[in-house]
Image (cartoon, rainbow, N blue to C red):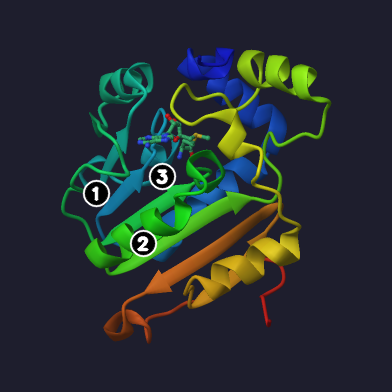
Amino acid sequence: MKSLMYRSPRLYLLMLKTMHGNELERRYQEIARIAGGRKVFEAGCGPALLGRYLEKDRYCGMDLNERFVRYARKKGYRCVVGDIMSDGFPKAEVGVIVDVLHHITPQEKRLIERMREKFETVVVIEPVSAFNVRMPGILRKIWDSLLGDADGINPLENRKRWIFTRKELMKYLKDVGADRVYTLGRDVVAVFRRSEDRDKSMMPLKESGSEFRG
Ligand SMILES: C[S@@+](CC[C@H](N)C(=O)[O-])C[C@H]1O[C@@H](n2cnc3c(N)ncnc32)[C@H](O)[C@@H]1O
């Protein structure tokens, strides 16, 4: 069962804007900055909001939500319907995972590993708390399936186990191998690089917050 926002790309955008305000734009700008002039593949691309921040021929995405993919394609973005946990990824230099880890948990480590095998740089951006609100069981279920994070792919039973404080999330991403972990507003950013790529600039935006020091 999909919640309302996973049925309508426009509602999805409205909900994200309401939740994140100006920080929404900042997360995509940060990815564009890290990517530089390189080609980007977005796993779990949704309606391809990131596409607006890159030249069209430098962006491609994959998602299992057919409506989102159709919407993105109408806007001129290269997107395919596919399962990011099992399908092959297209050619690109930078792999991006935005707002997706809390959906695919407990498989998130496997996705990060698959992406690291394929792309020279992998960027993960994850909100500290997404839709993981604490509520009594049945209320939580209703909330999830109406207005929450029910994507029609990943069960609530898995998703509700994704509970991290900011510090814990930063430590987790460092522990799974990120070269750099820092905050950007309410998001946590993790950058994984192949060794030959590590000496390229890794400085975050000026406004970026604290760096994880372990
Ligand atoms: C919160 S949305 C993030 C979308 C996009 N990255 C963004 O920044 O707006 C999570 C997306 O992950 C997709 N997703 C979840 N599991 C997936 C899977 N196994 N394969 C492909 N897409 C998946 C959902 O359909 C949904 O569009």
**In what element is the residue under mark 3?**
helix
Report crowding for label 2: few under 14, some 14 to 19, many 20 or more residues within 10 A (C-alpha).
Answer: many
Q: Badge 1 is on which residue?
A: 58
User: How far apart in space, not on screen, are marks 1 and 3 (Cα)?
Assistant: 10 Å
Amino acid identity at mark 1 = Arg
Q: Badge 3 is on which residue?
A: 53
**In what element is the residue under mark 2?**
helix
User: How far apart in space, not on screen, are marks 2 and 1 (Cα)?
Assistant: 10 Å
* Image mark count: 3
The residue closer to the viewer here, 128 or 202, is: 128
- Mark with earlier residue (2, 1): 2
**In what element is the residue under mark 1?**
helix
Ligand 1 - quadrant of the structure image: top left
Please report contact status of discs 1 and 3: CB closer than 8 Å, yes or no: no
Residue 35: give its label. Answer: 2
The residue closer to the viewer here, 210 or 88, is: 88
Amino acid identity at mark 2 = Ala
Classify mark 2 as within 8 Å of ligand 1 or not, answering yes or no.
Answer: no
Residue 160 in the image: x percent, y percent?
A: 66, 38
Vertical position of residue 30 compared to residue 157: above or below: below
Q: Residue at x 40, y 28 (%)?
A: 47
Dividing the picture into quarters, in which one does residue 15 lie?
A: top right
Q: Residue at x 36, y 61 (%)?
A: 35
Classify mark 1 as within 8 Å of ligand 1 or not, answering yes or no.
Answer: no
User: How far apart in space, not on screen, are marks 2 and 3 (Cα)?
Assistant: 11 Å
Amino acid identity at mark 3 = Tyr
